[in-house]
Structure formats: structure tokens, C-alpha cells
Amino acid sequence: MSDDRTEVTRQLGGTRAVEFDRALLDSSHAADPGEEAWRAMRIQGEFVNGFDILGKLGPAIAVFGSARLKEGTEAYELGFAVGRAVAESGFAVVTGGGPGVMEAANRGAVEGDGVSVGLGISLPFEDGFNKYVKLAVPFHYFFARKVNFVKYTQGAVVCAGGIGTLDELFEVMTLIQTGKVGDYPLALVGVKFWTPLIDWLRDTLKEEGTISEADVLRPLVTDDPAEAVAHATGRD
Ligand SMILES: CC(C)=CCNc1ncnc2c1ncn2[C@@H]1O[C@H](COP(=O)(O)O)[C@@H](O)[C@H]1O
């Protein structure tokens, strides 16, 4: 591993940090209550570090997408085009800093001469930041990281992904629906990928009365990275 990679992996905290995080959510309450109290300080530190670094970022767009869809897939190509278009629009690209579509978007940001940011998460099986992240912000807690994603971006482009991507999409949709964030445009890239989800929201959730039409209509769904970025940046 190169020195750079060693450094970013170190920033993510290594194995010990992963064990600490599991301990936070351990419902057997085996931990010493005194230690638990100190864990709260560590969480606080994560917010302080994120706010300190990202507060100086300027206009930025979040790009969410699969950790597993690698170079050679359509999703990677789209992620790259999205990252480049975000950078060329004068916005920083903020991803989860990992592999797959996140790497593609950071790579596009570098290609577009833009600011390339990764909000990394320490995971038992992950490998540090992808090599296109130029500003690396390490997190140990998903919830602290999600606050920083939304707080420091003005909109999001969501590419094809799995559980993590859906978590990020529904986090944003919940915050919008409940008025916790105001104007935060959302664009979904990949008509074939996202249409079944939108149909399910409309045909099942809206039909059952658990969401409203506004919730269904909110995200733009497109195959065109330029259109997605114009929407997320509020320039459409
Ligand atoms: C190969 C592998 C699984 C590595 C995981 N390494 C990761 N590194 C950084 N962010 C991640 C990672 N896994 C999930 N995420 C977060 O969840 C989303 C991707 O999860 P998924 O692949 O859709 O479910 C990303 O937008 C990212 O913010």
C-alpha cells in the first residue's frame, strides 16, 4: 500500500474504530456505562471535525451510488459523467469516498477540474478512500456522516445502488417531507433502474394513503447526467 493509501486508511480509524462502532449499537448493554459516556464525546468530535472542514467547502452536490458497480458498468460511466458535469457547473462533488459509483463521481470531479470530496465511513471490509478523493473526511458513524452530507450540499444526484444508496435517498426524502430541509433538489439517474421504485411509491404507498403525490413527484428521473446535474444544482 502506498503512503497516501496508508494515511487515508489510518484516517478511517482501522479495525479498532470498527469495533468501537459496533459497541455503540450493542443492545446487550455489556459495556461499562462509564465508557459509554465517553463514546458520546467521540461522536461529538466527529461532528466538530466535519463542520470544521466542510464549512469552508462552498457550493457542493452529493453524488450517491453503488459501492459494487465498478469500472466497465453503465452505472460507473454515468457516475463519472455526473461528477464531471457537477465540477464543470462550479460545484464540489461530495461522495461516500468509496469504490464503484462513488469512485466514478470523484474521478469525474478530478477530470472536470473540480473539488473532489469523500465522506468516508470505516467498515470492516473497506479499503480506505478511493484515489480520486482530494479532500478526505473520515467518519465512524453513519448518522454523523449523513448529517454532514445534507448540511454541506445544495442538492443530490442518486445513481444506481443498493441498501446504502437507498438509505441516503430515503434520508433526504424524509428530511424534505418533514420540512427539516427546504429547497434540496433530488435527481435520480437511470430511468430503467429507478422507475419500478417510483411506480411502487405511486401505485402502492400513495394508493394506500401513506404518502402524497408531492412525495412521488419530487425526484427528477432521467438517463441524462447533464439534466440530472442541472436539476440538482437548481439550474434547470
Ligand atoms: C466493496 C464495498 C461494499 C465497500 C463499501 N465501502 C463503502 N465506502 C464508502 N461508502 C459506502 C460504502 N458502502 C456503502 N457506502 C455508502 O452507501 C452508498 C453505497 O451503498 P450501496 O453499495 O448502494 O449499498 C454510498 O453512496 C455510500 O455513501
Image (spheres, rainbow, N blue to C red):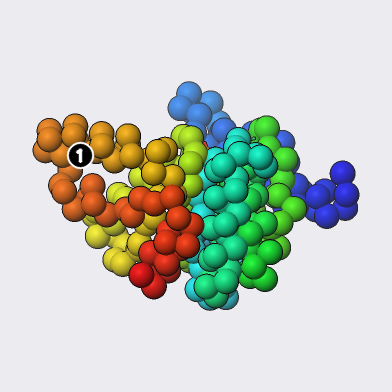
Viewer-closest of 173 and 161: 161
Ligand 1 located in image quadrant: top right
Q: Badge 1 local density, few (<14 within 10 Å), some, or many (20+)? A: some
Q: Is mark 1 within 8 Å of ligand 1?
A: no
Residue extending furthest right? 2
In the image: residue 6, left or right of residue 114: right
Q: Position of residue 215 (x, y in %)?
A: 22, 50
Q: Is residue 105 left or right of residue 180?
A: right
Residue 234, picture quadrant: bottom left
Q: Type of residue at label 1? A: Arg
**Residue at 88%, 53% in the rendered image:** 3
> Considering only vertical position in the picture, is 89 above or below 223?
below
Quadrant position of the C terminus in the picture: bottom left
The quarter of the image holding the N terminus is top right
Secondary element type, mark 1: helix
Q: How many marks?
A: 1
User: In the rendering, at what x and y percent does residue 224 appear?
Assistant: 45, 55
Residue at 17% across, 43% down: 211
Return the x and y of residue 59 as percentages of the image width and height. Answer: 50, 73
Residue of label 1: 202
Work out whether residue 193 or residue 157 is closer to the camera in this orientation and state it.
Answer: 193
Residue 235's place in the image compared with 190, above or below, is below
The residue sitting at 23% across, 47% down in the picture is 216
Rendered position, 153 above or below 187? below
Q: Observer-nearest residue: 230 or 206?
A: 230
Name which residue lies at 32% across and 53% down.
Answer: 219
Location of residue 112 (image quadrant): bottom right
Residue 68, can we see it?
yes
- Does any portion of residue 144 appear in the rendered image? no
Question: Relative to 124, does residue 63 appear above or below in the rendering?
Answer: below
Where residue 106 sits in the image (x, y, percent)? Answer: 64, 57
